[in-house]
Image (cartoon, grey):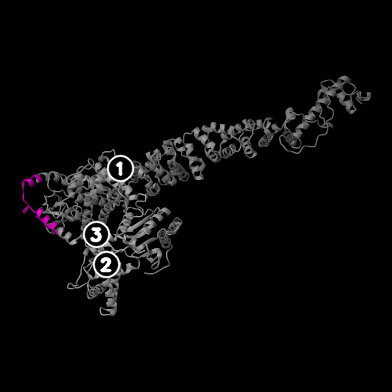
Amino acid sequence: MPAHDPQGTRGLLIDLFLLMKTIGTHGVDHPLTAKGANLLAESLKKASPPIELHFVGRAVFRDRTLVPLDLDEYPKVLELSAAAVGMGATELVIDGTPKVVDVIRLGDLLAAGAKGIAAPGSAKIAGVSWRDLPAARWGRDAEDVDPEVFCATHLALAIARTEELVARNREPWNWSHGMAVVRRLENAVERSADGLARALEVAPGEWSPARRAVSATYRLLSATVALGVQKQAARAAAHALLGLTCHGLAPVGGVATVKGAAAALLRMMPAPSGGKANASAGKGSRVAPHRLKVCALLHEIAHTARDPREWEGLPALIHLVYDLEKGRIPGNVDFALTYADLLAQAAAKMGDGFDERSVRTLVYASGEIPLGAHVTLADGHAGIVIEHGGDPLRPKVLVGTQLVMPDRPVALRPPAPRATRTGTRFGA
Amino acid sequence: MATAQPSPIALAFGGLIHSMQQGAFDLEGMARQAVDAWLAEPDTTLTLDGTTLLVNGQDALGAKAKEGRWVLPAFMAGLREIRLDEAGPEASDMLRLAEELANLKPQAEAVEAFRDWLWMDGAEGFTCVCEESFTDALDAAFVDPTAAKQELLALRSEAAMSLSDTTLAVHSRDLDAAAIREEFQLPLDALVASAREHGFDVDEIRRAELKRGCEDPAFWVKAQVDFAAANPALAPSLDPRKLAVSVVQTLKHDLDLDLVAVLGELAQRKDPFAVALAAAIEREPIGETIAASVRLNEVGSTEVERLLSGDRSRISQGFVHGFMERAGNDRAALDAAIALVKKVGLKNLWKHVDLGKLGAPMQRGLVQVLPKCDPNPAIARDLLRNAKTAGALLAAMPAAALVPLIGEVKTFLEKAEHGAAEPVVDALLKGGDAATVKLLGEIALARDGGGWRKQTLEPLLKALVAGGHGAELVLPLAKNKKADPPARLVAYQALRGEPALFDKAIARSVSDASEPAQIKQWLDTVRGGGSSGGGVARYVAIALVVLVVVVAGGAFAYMKKEGLDFAGLVGRITGSAPATPATPAESAKPEGRKPGATPAPTPPASAKPADKPGATPATPAKPAGKPKSPNQRPKPASPDAANGK
């Protein structure tokens, strides 16, 4: 059964496709072209402009909503999408109702785009505008996206989602958003773990609870990836930690791990898991394994009788990462610590305040000189670690605007106070 | 892309989805068919490519097949591959996935919900490989990468500024900060120093250990069970079967004794989910899996000990059975089993044994383990209660193990009805040693051989005779008038193994008259036609002696009467008797004499039996002549004979 499409977008897309194909075959002056253009003009009218179309990946969106397509329509729209991308119109906006001649012009540009010819910079069509979204090539087409950009993008989205989760702490937990955060971090780690670490640590802006929550979740994920932990366990732990940090972290410091876990569990428990459209949701059917694991883990942390210093395995690792992020904003200074500082504190308390294996895991995952750490080179120059080298004690260091490969081990140095610039919060 | 024959898996799977959309019946049957089709080719991967479904790179369904209409919305949700996971789906799993796909519309909300469901491992029994969904891609497309790049550039500038001593403004607040920074410096130095000394090296072994610490199956199982116990309202929504299956998979790959301990604790809990999980686990071969996977040096661990110390459960039973089976096939495992039994005590092991499920390999193991342990009368009783299966176990046990239990065995055999006792006797006889055989003989004698069939009694009695216990145990049975005649006959027959005893058994006696007819008839047969040649000869010899005595007595009496001496008697007999009576001394010399012609007398009833039973009887000897008494005076001869002519 065709999906519901009150705005007639599907019809519009098919007519646009047909016009493109007609022009591609017969040229702009053919009677068939005129006929097609008239049809398209009608469709445009029915579709109630303004119409904002996005051709992203292998889908089409109208007003940022996925256009539902059936099996017959999809291959045609896919071809249209490829043509739009070729034309340089990942975003196509149609204001008002263009004239037939303008419609033909649009069709002509699309036909050229189908052949890989981008629209000339001077090309203009009344009532129609377009632009290219460089980040719109994802999935299979993502290979040409700069990994830095990829990671920065996903990180920004993750932080934005987490901000929402933190802000709506009186509502049931939005599992979809929580999973989206973990998913984005997973994708980013997979694409470029260093890129994500850099983006997280060195980007300017304040260390809000949301950013610290994302940082904690990332650290846990990167540790589990480094160890090769089973994905299900790793995701569940990351999601649990995200919940814990969202409820436990304050602008400065935060509550105890146990208390944060209890608060997170309280919020997660009554929330539906899969969303309304999910067939299994709301039918009294089974709780998804992931949700059970997340809740079970938080329950275990919240109700354990043992001192956190005696914890082992994932609870110990979660406690460590959470506690470190809690201490990222020391109450008596106006700067945030770097991850290197946090790691150093963890190392100092290893075996006493923190489980030794957990500290070792974190150091193993991030390296002894983590990305983003402030270091002093042997020649006295100061810099920020940007990339790991072959030797963990001689990473690549950004000194000023130059990338330097030290020939001798570097020394960690504490962070300098940062000038906090309002309005430049990362991701805003 | 080449078009091949439609894939049976794709057809079954797609057909199920399509049928679901059409509201068809018997979906469960179709789901089972789809599972079976996939399990027939378990490595098959379904690949989604836009509107096309591929199997091994080939179009699996053909263009616009109705079974493939689910592909596009699933593709929109980011689904790219579906294959079976290690445990494989059940029909209910297939139904669930099909239902999700059947209801999936190519709309944003539905696509996102399906993507979330996949990500939450909702497709149990399957491994689903996903990429970004269409909606995820759109979100990412609107983050301005230029801004991100600009921020990175800003960072570099900022970094350059902040780290340059010449541009850093020093304020009092910063001086305070600088002082505090020294506190941070110490840990930083320590971190680097530790790093330099390789304090944080993680080699492969350590890495595996850390990984294991994060994956810890025991922790996850316990956490989920504890959570379910604390939230009983969730119980109907939780499926313990899947957890049970995952537990088995975990144990198969890497036996985790902590998990074994958790399972043991689980079996003792009463909260609903734990009970349901325990029941689900009971249906899985977990105990057997543990037995097969456990490292021999861990068999004696605390966790295993705890498992055996608890009440009997399917797991503990499976473990004991499985491990005894392993011990029966492997010497090293046998040593470990013996050590385990010595540690936990035979009683603790035994309570988990189900003799009704005693297979041959497990018997082999038990048979070798039991003798090494302190025997336990309760165990003997248990074995005896299951005589049909346990008989072999009893029999296979060396005498040294059986002897301490023998009291129980004896009691049992003394009281058991035939049919129950016989397998035990048979088995004990087959495998038992002399002491055991003797014991059985005592029991048989005590029962007067009653209640045991010939097939059981005969070999026993023969063994007793062969073992030198014929006189003590078999002969009394043969002679025991209270015993059943058939049993007595068997005893008699068994005594043939020792001829002396046999002869003694069948020797005539005054009590023959009161023998039952069956016995009498048999004895008659054996004695009458059945004595040995040696026996007959004896009878003849006795008869001759008697004859001689009688004749001699008669001759003496005649000699006295006639006043003859021996020579006179001889003379009178031969007709050349001297007149004068002989001196007693002369007449005292005996003369050889031929055996008389009188018929041999019937041998007396108390005569000894023949040496060789069954020997053909000798021709009866001619009756002996009257014996002549050396003192018998010969008849007076004619005067001429008396005068020496």
Tell me which label, 2 or 1, sits earlier in the chain. 2
Residue B280's place in the image compared with B557, above or below, is below
- Give the percent coordinates (x, y) of residue A100: 24, 75
Select label 3 or label 1 by which is in front.
3
Q: How many marks?
A: 3
Secondary structure found at label 1 = helix
Q: Which residues are magenta?
A: B152-177
Protein chain holding label 1? A
- Chain ID, mark 3: B
- Mark 2 — residue? A47
Give residue B514's mark: none
Q: Indicate left or right for A73 with B640 as reference.
A: left
Residue B596 on image: x %, y %:
83, 31
Query: Is residue B203 visible in this depiction of the protein?
Result: yes
- Judge the density around disc 2: few (<14), some (14-19), many (≥20) Cα neighbours within 10 Å: some
> Contact (CB < 8 A) between labels 3 and 1?
no
